[in-house]
Structures are given as structure tokens and as C-alpha cells.
Amino acid sequence: MALGDAASVGGAVAKAFTGVRAPSTLGTFLRAFSWGHVRQLESTARAFICNLTVHCNLLPGGDQVVRLDIDSKVKQVYGGAKQGAEHGYTKVKGLHFQIVTASTPLAAPVIVATRLRRGAAGSAKGAASLIAEAIKTVRAMGATGVITVRADSAFFSHKVVATCRRAKVRFVAGMLSGADSIDDLDVLRHVNRDNDPQPPFTALQRNLSPPPRPSRSPRPLTTRRLNRKDTPIRPR
């Protein structure tokens, strides 16, 4: 019962409280949450969606193929005292959230994991742990098929790849030419030829600080035709 409703029930507010009480707002309630409270809510949300699956089939076809898609977005917010609001890569003051959805060829996307972060957080910050939680959630929902994690180049990292391999799921991630992926122009020219076999490629070789990782093994490299400024366009 809300305080406003209680006031009309025989003076219940006057009996329950002393002095004048102003109604609280949802914002005041949420700002009192600590990180531990948020994690408890996330656990409750996972339990809810798993129990909901028992009553309605949220992931039909989950015994065959399940796709987990992760992405992030900066949501613009207003107010100088907004906690965590910062300017990130979009140059917009806001909060930067991550979201993971699960879908199958027969099911529309279902949100299975979320995380709210400060505005200046990098896109991939915390992505590995969020993906791990999403994988556990869809398996708890009864998915027994092949799980494939899909992400863009912002999430392509040692931690994400290692998380997927530990969980024995497949992954598809974009790679940027340069920094820590493909920086050999001859390789780019080779894989851009039509009807060429996919060359073996070992990614993430430059990072020397982490311990040895199982991700350092040759894998087929699938490329999309892209024109680089320093590469002449070859007629089809």
C-alpha cells in the first residue's frame, strides 16, 4: 500500500509515523543500492527468467542452436550530479550499459544478461564475465544445443575468447586491421581473393603480459571484402 492510500485508511499514516513524511521517489530508492544489491537483483532476474521458461518456451529450438549477441550503448543522461555519468567514446555524457540477448532460428531475442557501467567505460570492460553469466543462464533455461557468441570488434580480446573456450561454446567476433589482429598487407590481399581457401590465422599474438592462453592456435580466417585506403581496388 502506498503512503497516499494509507492516509485515507483511518489515519494510518499518523499512527505509523510521527511528524510530516514526504513520499519517496524511485530515484532515491535506486540511488541507495550498492554493488552488492545490484548483483542480488541480477541473480533474481536470472532465476526469474529460468522459472519463466518452465511455463512458456522462451527459446524454442534451443536444443539445436542458440546465439548469444553482446553489445553496448551509451545512453545520454542529464543532471550534473548523476552518478557515473561521464563522457565516453561517443562524446555524449551518459551511462554505458552492456546487454546480452539469446535467440534461436525459431525464437526472438530474449535479454539474458545486463550490466550498467559508468559512461567512460570501454565497450569490452567486464564483457568476459557478462558472457560467462549469459552462457550459464541459457543453459539453466534448458538450452542444450550449440551456443555461439557473436560480437563486434570492440569485444575481441583474450579474455572474451578464453571465456568462450572454457565454456565450450563457439564465438564469432570482428577484428580490426592493425592493432592486435591483422597487420600483414599480404595476408589481406590473399584473403580478399575470390574462391581462395581460408588461410589459418593465429590471432592475439602481440599481448605478452597475460599467461599462455588456449586461444593462440591457428583458426580459419573468414573475411569480408573491404577496401583499404592503401590498397588499390581490384576490378571484379
Image (spheres, helix red, strand yellow):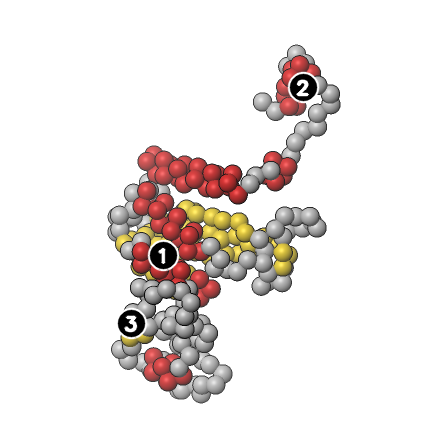
Element type where label 3 sits in the image: loop
Q: Which residue is mark 2?
A: 17
Which of the marked residues, 3 or 2, is nearer the chain's N terminus? 2
Q: CA distance from mark 1 to mark 2?
A: 52 Å
Task: Identify the disc placed on residue 108.
Answer: none
Q: Which residue is mark 1?
A: 163
Which residue is at 41% across, 73% downward? 206
Seen from the viewer's position, the closer of residues 31 and 62 is 31
Q: CA distance from mark 3 to mark 2?
A: 69 Å
Element type where label 2 sits in the image: loop
Q: Amino acid at mark 3?
A: Pro
Q: Quadrant of the C terminus?
A: bottom left
Q: Is residue 75 visible from the viewing direction of this image?
A: no
Which of the marked residues, 1 or 3, is nearer the chain's N terminus? 1
Q: Amino acid at mark 1?
A: Thr
Instruction: Write down the quadrant of residue 92 in the picture.
Output: bottom right
**Left or right, residue 167 beside residue 180:** left
